[in-house]
Amino acid sequence: MIVGSLASIWRYPVKSLRGEPLDSVAVDAAGIPGDRSSALFVRSGHAREGKTFRGKEHDRLHLTNDPVEAVRLGAERGVALEHQIGEHFFDDAPISLLLDVWLRELRVHAGYEVQPERFRPNFFVRARPDFGLKEGDLADAELLLGAVRLRVRDPIGRCVTTTYDPEGAASDPEVLQFVVRERNGWMGVYCDVLQAGVVRTGDDVVLRASS
């Protein structure tokens, strides 16, 4: 079953900072190389000492892709940060995927085009008009994107970072309120990589039933 086509690809080199769009990417078993391959850790000045400093803790992090600038932003709030490089600093699974159809009711409710960037997906899919499945319907299903094969793990539960405007305008708390009230707090799905390969914008996204 064809779900739709891949509209956008994003990689987030530093966890919680601005992502970068890609036209194509070689996906391996651990996800997208370079995705969330470094993170900011709290050294002092915050309850998350020794843990990652995220968008939840600072609503401006997503506006920069420069870890030096992010450290400065933390210092302005009295938080000492250290930029650490590793392999991946994922919240849960290596790949996140979002369909435009899941945003439709939210956009109608909000009265404007709620940007997919608020939800920080790796893959954003433009669904066919007749596709009506929701996140929970896809649990354990396989998705083919170009040469890449994914297995859907779980719906993604959302937090306050979805209320932040990607371009820095005023936050909109109704975004998260709607997702919690009308969509069980879900927007998008986490996936594991079953087969590595190259994926490109414009590739078909095909759903295979869970085995």
Image: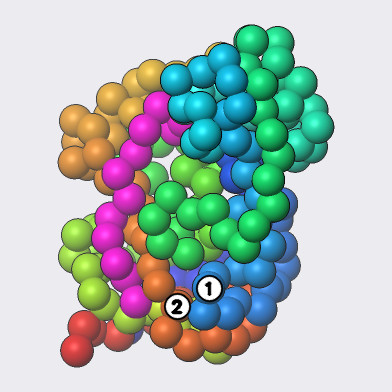
Q: Is residue 42 above or below residue 131?
A: above
* Residue type, label 1: Ala
Rendered image quadrant of residue 210 = bottom left
Q: Give residue 34's position: percent from left, percent from top.
A: 68, 62
Q: Give residue 81's position: percent from left, percent from top.
A: 66, 28
Q: Is residue 161 magenta?
A: yes
Q: Residue at x 47, y 64 (%)?
A: 95
**Horizontal arrangement in the rendering, residue 101 relative to residue 65 (left or right):** left
Kindly tell me whether residue 18 is visible in this rendering: no
* Crowd rating for badge 2 (residues with CA inside 10 Å; few <14, some 14–19, many 20+): many
Residue at mark 1: 30
Residue at mark 2: 193
**Range shown magenta:** 151-169
* Crowd rating for badge 1 (residues with CA inside 10 Å; few <14, some 14–19, many 20+): some
Please tell me which residue lies in front, 75 or 165.
75
Q: How is the image coloured?
A: rainbow
Quadrant housing the N terminus: bottom left
> Would you say the residues marked 1 and 2 are in contact, meaning their CB atoms lie under 8 Å apart?
yes
Kindly tell me whether residue 41 is visible in this rendering: yes
Foreground: disc 1 or disc 2:
1
Please tell me which residue lies in front, 8 or 95.
95
Q: Give residue 192's position: percent from left, percent from top.
A: 40, 72
Q: Is residue 153 above or below residue 134?
A: below
